[in-house]
Image (spheres, grey):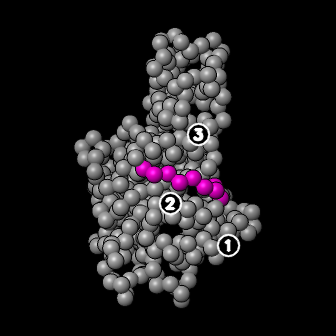
């Protein structure tokens, strides 16, 4: 029998509840999703990477971004994330599945490789059914889990609890009497500074992660998580940027599903858009920048056009538009709102540009 085929599956969608379109926000000249997928693809021991997104039109830009990087895409039901993972694993012919989420652009290939190696170290007789990175000891945003595809298919066929279908793996790790759940993989030395959060759920998270990426990529594009820690020790004020953001947990999700209330909503501080200096573009400047982005002659766009009449307005242009607006104005365009834009005038509104001539 040959070596098992190990496939990493990352989930992503544009309609995040706290920061829509977050995985397409730019950092160091490319979307966070591109950073995430490129880093994940460098993982030792991994045979393939798949992006599992939804069948919604709003997620077309995510599929386009992945495909441009040569990453396979599986599209399924938005709410049934477990079913999406099972479909992605079957499509990729996985024997073992590494589960990650695309809101972790700082995912560390070496650490995920260590997870894969540790999972296989037990031998056939003592091999665990489930192993994860200890997110209570590592910074949040390095999270990964590994398990056999057979267990994923069992979970998909038997799980009925909405939380089990949304969060994919509770069916496995909440049944230690049935499955061999190994102790989570811990750091070899204590993390300093401790208590860090590098996943992107709110604007403050994006601010911190963007700073880390833009500080590290120019000098070391293949930086690791320890390099992020070093930067934070050099910039201790950055540690406080997203300290007020609370991690959304399965417990909170389950209570919200049962009661219709979010137990942390009252404690979650309103977080401001990242602290890039805001700049106002006038109508003419905006249209000229959009002409250039769409490879049109200067002065082509008047502001009255519908997007469907623009040959170059496609899913990749959507990514470029988000980056353009961020660079020129400091405004973070919400992906959900951008997906609803129908005209060039709608784009102006999203960019904070005066529509009237």
- Residue 272 shows in the view: no
**Snapshot quadrant of residue 85:** bottom right
Question: What residue appears at the point 49 percent right and 64 percent down from the top-left corner?
Answer: 89
Q: Secondary structure at mark 1?
A: loop
Drawn side of residue 2 relative to residue 151, left or right: left
Question: What residue appears at the point 51 percent right and 64 percent down from the top-left corner?
Answer: 90
Q: Position of residue 185 (x, y in %)?
A: 37, 74
The residues bearing labels 3 and 1 have C-alpha atoms spaced at a distance of 31 Å
Give the mark toward the camera: 1 or 2: 2
Q: Position of residue 46 (x, y in %)?
A: 35, 62
Name the residue that disc number 2 marks: 91
Drawn side of residue 343 relative to residue 325, left or right: right
Name the residue that disc number 1 marks: 161
Give the mark toward the camera: 3 or 1: 1
Binning the other alpha carbons within 10 Å of mark 2 as few (below 14), some (14 to 19) or many (20 upward) gives few
Q: Are marks 3 and 1 in contact (CB under 8 Å)?
A: no
The residues bearing labels 3 and 2 have C-alpha atoms spaced at a distance of 31 Å
Front-most of residues 184 and 129: 129
Dot 3 or dot 2, earlier in sequence: 2
Dot 3 or dot 1, earlier in sequence: 1
Front-most of residues 349 and 313: 313
Name the residue that disc number 3 marks: 334
**Snapshot quadrant of residue 305:** top right
Give the mark toward the camera: 3 or 2: 2
- Magenta region, residue range: 71-79
Q: Secondary structure at mark 3?
A: loop
Question: Of all residues shown, which one is farthest toward the front?
Answer: 1
């Amino acid at each position: 029998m040959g070596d098992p085929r190990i496939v990493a599956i990352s989930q992503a969608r544009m309609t995040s509840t706290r920061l829509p379109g977050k995985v397409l926000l730019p950092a160091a000249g490319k979307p966070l999703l591109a950073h995430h997928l490129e880093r994940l693809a460098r993982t030792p021991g991994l045979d393939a990477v798949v992006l599992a997104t939804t069948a919604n039109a709003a997620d077309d830009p995510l599929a386009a971004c992945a495909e441009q990087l040569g990453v396979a895409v599986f599209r399924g039901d938005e709410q049934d994330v477990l079913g999406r993972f099972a479909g992605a694993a079957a499509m990729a012919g996985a024997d073992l599945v590494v589960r990650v989420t695309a809101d972790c652009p700082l995912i560390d290939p070496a650490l995920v490789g260590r997870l894969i190696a540790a999972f296989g170290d037990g031998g056939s007789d003592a091999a665990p059914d489930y192993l994860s990175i200890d997110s209570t000891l590592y910074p949040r945003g390095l999270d990964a889990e590994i398990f056999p595809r057979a267990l994923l298919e069992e979970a998909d066929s038997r799980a009925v609890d909405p939380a089990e279908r949304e969060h994919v793996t509770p069916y496995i790790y909440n049944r230690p009497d049935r499955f061999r759940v190994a102790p989570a993989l811990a750091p070899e030395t204590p993390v300093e500074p401790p208590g860090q959060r590098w996943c992107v759920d709110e604007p403050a998270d994006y601010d911190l992660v963007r700073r880390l990426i833009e500080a590290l990529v120019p000098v070391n594009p293949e930086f690791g998580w320890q390099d992020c820690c070093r930067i934070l020790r050099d910039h201790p004020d950055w540690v406080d940027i997203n300290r007020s953001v609370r991690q959304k947990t399965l417990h909170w999700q389950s209570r919200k599903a049962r009661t219709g209330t979010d137990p942390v909503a009252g404690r979650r501080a309103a977080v401001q858009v990242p602290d890039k200096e805001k700049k106002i573009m006038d109508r003419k400047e905006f249209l000229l920048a959009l002409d250039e982005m769409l490879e049109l002659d200067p002065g082509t766009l008047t502001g009255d056009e519908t997007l469907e009449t623009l040959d170059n307005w496609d899913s990749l242009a959507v990514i470029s538009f988000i980056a353009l607006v961020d660079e020129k104005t400091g405004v973070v365009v919400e992906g959900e709102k951008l997906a609803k834009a129908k005209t060039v005038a709608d784009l102006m509104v999203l960019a904070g540009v005066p529509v009237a001539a």
